[in-house]
Amino acid sequence: MGRRNQPVEELFAAARGGDRSALARLISLVERGADEARAIGRLSAPLGGRAHTIGITGAPGAGKSTLTSATIGHLRALGLEVAVLAIDPSSPFTGGAILGDRVRMQEHATDPGVFIRSMATRGHLGGLSLSAPQAIRLLDAMGREWVLVETVGVGQVEVEIAGTADTTIVVVNPGWGDAVQANKAGLMEIADIFVINKSDRQGAEETRRDLEQMLDLSDLAHGSWRPPIISTVATSGQGVAELWSAVLAHRDCATLNGGLADRRERRLRDELRDIVARRLERRAREICGDDRWQALQTEVLEHRLDPWAAADQMLDDIGA
Ligand SMILES: Nc1nc2c(ncn2[C@@H]2O[C@H](COP(=O)(O)OP(=O)(O)OP(=O)(O)O)[C@@H](O)[C@H]2O)c(=O)[nH]1
Ligand SMILES: [Mg+2]
């Protein structure tokens, strides 16, 4: 039987047993927001809670994928397994076919301890904000302890997603104003760790100064944590070990001071609210068009009823 017709339960069991193509198929279903996504969510829920998610975000071309690849190499050398989700909201490709990422992370593609998947979200009803957490929950349920999530740090939704990771790494490059741009894009607030990648280029020191200054001014010490600034050259792996130490230090600090638990709670609360809001929205579209609606609309048009009272009646009808 082909993967396409395989029941979700079977795919899930196979993926739990280490079958990567089954896992890839499950993520495709989540990505498309198919009915099966519900079943996947149900199967994943009781198994999760162990993964630490690491968001890697920054401007296009900052070196996020190269840095991710170097980090994978570092983790594998430590004997750790890792899953990577590269989220590209604008890509027309699905199924892990984002070319640049394929090329940049290719050296890890056949390593059974590494699962890499690009995720495009075109056509998904719930959009990126719903499918990304579902995919992460699925990877968590597979027992992956470390989940790296690469997102391009432009656009509100992307920044939001990056900001909900357990540890968020914001990547900037040397050069005049790059830190300022990151600040403008809203990346300053979500950073747990700053990386100045491409530190082999000129201007790394100025960028570090800019960042330090912004941190001083903006009171961004998250609890007892002040985001450290790590210089890296992702292409050579320089600074990656230091970056990983910073990730572990952040995890430990956020675990101790309760920041991690708070963040996870907030993340779930937002997701839940999002799901409910979308459902209500859909329901609203359904009822605003039926016969009852037409009748009420006429009453409002003829000045026999005000719009608020009409809305009350509509909502009463559905018990909302
Ligand atoms: N000189 C130098 N080049 C780098 C470094 N890291 C990445 N690059 C190069 O920068 C380019 C972009 O790298 P990517 O890793 O694809 O960047 P990205 O942020 O993932 O890009 P998008 O996903 O397209 O937003 C590639 O040509 C890399 O080889 C570095 O530390 N130094
Ligand atoms: Mg990339």
Image: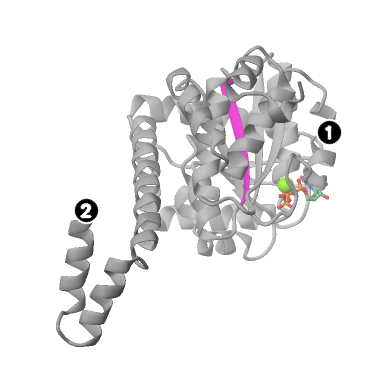
The residue closer to the viewer here, 37 or 175, is 37
Q: Is residue 67 magenta?
A: no
Residue 252 position by quadrant: top left
Amino acid residing under circle 1: Gln
Judge from the rendering whether residue 208 lies leftward or rightward of residue 105; answer left or right: left
Q: Is residue 210 above or below residue 264?
A: below
Instruction: Check disc 2 and report the residue beneath it.
Output: 320
x and y percentages locating residue 199 in the rendered image: 73, 47
Question: Is there any visible trace of residue 146 in the rendered image?
Answer: yes
**Image point 39% across, 62% down: which residue?**
285
Residue 265 position by quadrant: top left
Mark 1 or mark 2, whichever is nearer to me: 2
Judge from the rendering whether residue 213 lies leftward or rightward of residue 229; answer left or right: left
Real-space CA distance between mark 1 and mark 2, rounded to the nearest whole angstrom = 51 Å
Q: Which residues are magenta?
A: 144-152
Q: Is residue 307 above or below residue 60?
A: below
Instruction: Check disc 1 and report the residue beneath it.
Output: 106
**Image point 47% across, 34% down: which residue?**
166
The residue closer to the viewer here, 259 or 209, is 259
**Image point 36% across, 55% down: which residue?**
283
Q: Secondary structure at mark 1?
A: helix
x and y percentages locating residue 280 in the rendered image: 34, 53
